[in-house]
Amino acid sequence: MPMATLRPALIASLAAIACIPAFSSAATAQASPTIRVGIAIARPQIRVGSSTPAIVRNEQGQQLGQLPTQQGSYAQPLANGQVQLGSFRARQIWLEPTNDGLVWIGDRWYRGRLQLILDQGAVTAVNHVGLESYLYSVVGSEVYASWPIEALKAQAVAARSFVLYRRDRNRDPRFDVGNSTTWQVYKGVSSEAPTTINAVNATAGQVLTYNSRVIEAVFHASSGGHTENVEDIWSNSLPYLRGVQDFDQSAPVFNWSQSFSAQDLSAKLTGVGRILQIEPLKTTRFGRIRDLRITGDRGSRVVKGDEVRRALNLRSSLFTVSSETSSGWFDFLQPNRSEQPPSQFTITGRGYGHGLGLSQWGAYGLASQGVDYRRILSHFYQNTNLSALGGAIAQNSPSE
């Protein structure tokens, strides 16, 4: 169905976006690989538009017509296996803004082109965008644009390495990466800033490599004082994801706590009845919970620390648990009284994320002390090299 002109507030946002340069040079744009980002996946309809007149093409590249400036439509599936966008119909529809315009997908503006495909009886929107343009948004989505430039540069190189590693191993024919924390956060031009653009341009084409292969440059917000060896968190050992001292003490999530009533906790961690005790059985060298035993009035079971983290929406698996009864702390503070079942549990922890690779708040801490991005990266990614893009990609292989 046709859609009215894009909302005035959204149009007004283009004025602010216009002051952000697209590239530092034409050479940078030409050298940038294209990343396919899944923005809206298998939706019954997706609202799309363009900031400039946009050419509409089908899957064969044939021009179907043009979408006017600021005039949007809903993309939706048809029963005959085609996608409809206003009066246009094709098995796939491409929207290509002219004059370096932006595409509107759902509720955000994005650089690059838009591909609309039929997906499980619904429509999926894929943003095809140059790598460096993609990173302008990722850096601003993952960390604060006001951070020291060396921290932003470190994030740019890590994010560039991460997306290329994932792209080369992705088996999804629709897109290379998504736009959430499962991949890395990508919010379009709304998260760009002159500082994030400068950081990306200053490191253009630089990736982290080990044995001439782009590494899996994972990152997290804060480790709580020390990052982890990858085999203690996941499965395979990697020589570049080793536990190192962190410098994240200024992180707002360096220390945290969450409290749960016994009833609420028992509803979230099921299978043992009313929970009476939670005790760690195995931790990593640096304190993250790997296994713990949950004991209740109907039995007990052993669970993974990450399972508890997900169930309780904790910031990390680096935590301890204490309990309290209605008459006081349950941890044997009153040994002469008969034990009462806990009425409340308090989980006290440190850090935010899996604790592997770059600590974003650690990069902030180091950059604030005058450490440059090269040294930040070599600290958090041990045994790696800072390499030029082309040769590293050519030698990259999923067989690691």
Image (cartoon, rainbow, N blue to C red):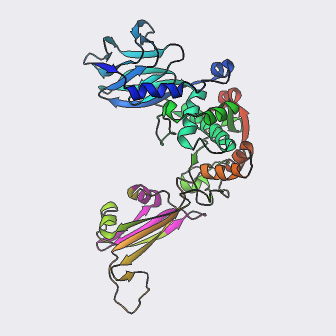
Q: Which quadrant would the C terminus be assigned to in this image?
A: top right
At x 54%, y 31%, the residue is 167
Q: Is residue 397 above or below residue 322?
A: above
Where residue 217 appears, x then y in whole percent?
Answer: 61, 42
- In the figure, residue 75 lies in which quadrant? top left
250 horizontally vs 90: left or right: right
Where residue 199 appears, x then y in whole percent?
Answer: 66, 35
- In the figure, residue 328 lies in which quadrant? bottom left
At x 31%, y 66%, the residue is 266
Where residue 42 appears, x then y in whole percent?
Answer: 34, 30
Q: Residue furthest left?
A: 79
Foreground pick, 186 / 308: 186
At x 54%, y 65%, the residue is 283
Residues in magenta, as a range = 281-310
150 horizontally vs 305: left or right: right
Q: Which quadrant would the N terminus be assigned to in this image?
A: top left
At x 61%, y 25%, the residue is 21
211 horizontally vs 285: left or right: right
Foreground pick, 116 / 277: 116
